[in-house]
Image (cartoon, rainbow, N blue to C red):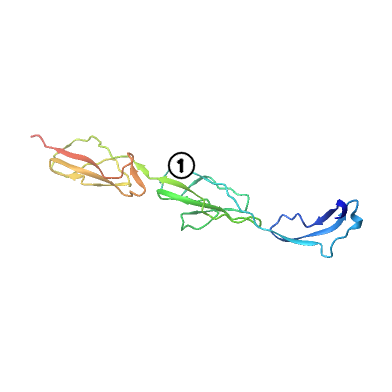
Amino acid sequence: LVNGDEIKVELTGNAMQTVGTHIARATRLTGAKAANYKLPANATKEYTIAKAAGSVNAPTGKTGLRYTGQAQELLETAAATDFGNVEYKLGESGTWSTDMPKATNAGEYTIYYLSTGDKNHYETDGTDSIKVTIGRKQIAVPQSRGTEFTYNGNVQTYDVSRTAEYSVSNNTRTDAGSQTVSYELTDKANTEWADGSDTSKTLTFTIERQRI
């Protein structure tokens, strides 16, 4: 510009916001000295807008879950994104899905989550994760009913209230004397005794001698 002339250039196509290649074009010169200048024959400039990084807000996992035998949702609140959809998978070998993650068995689960992105944002890399635990179902420890047994010549059974969660062994006897009755959890992967253990529990079965 000559002698510090101030000239403004009016443009079109220079404020695009979508990803892709665009062309900005100079259409007119304005200013007090504009009549002394002219635009070049090719008054265009090509420019490119690249995709921006996507983002996703972490979900929160449920706490206090215990095994019920049924599939349970693992998240208290879902992950969130402004760019596309949220997808989850359970463990590294899981399959990505928009469904809220569920699990049945007791154990610790790693939940991966991502944003699928949109036309202007990339998908996140899928390495973000949280852990959620389903605890084992607690089973009441068998207790003696306080029944007194006396020798009567017949087979007698030491019985306590029982459930399908544990098995009972060595609980029948005929002669006077004592023996150990054992109780064993049938599914140690998903159940535990109410004291937090999963080893066998025992009670003593005693048949008293008959008075004559």
Q: Nearer the viewer, residue 151 or 144?
A: 144
Q: Is residue 75 left or right of residue 121?
A: left
Residue 46 lies, with reference to residue 160, above or below; the image says below
Residue 159: horizontal and vertical position, in percent?
24, 41
Residue furthest to the bottom:
41
Callout 1 amino acid = Thr
Q: Nearer the viewer, residue 86 or 12?
A: 12
Q: Position of residue 211 (x, y in %)?
A: 9, 34
Disc 1 target residue: 63
Residue furthest to the front: 3
Q: Nearer the viewer, residue 76 or 43?
A: 43
- Horizontally, residue 31 falls left or right of residue 86, namely right
Please report the residue visible at 83 percent of the width from the left and 54 percent of the height from the top.
10
Label count reads 1
The secondary element bearing badge 1 is classed as loop
Name the residue: 21% across, 44% down: 171
Left or right of 98, for residue 51: right
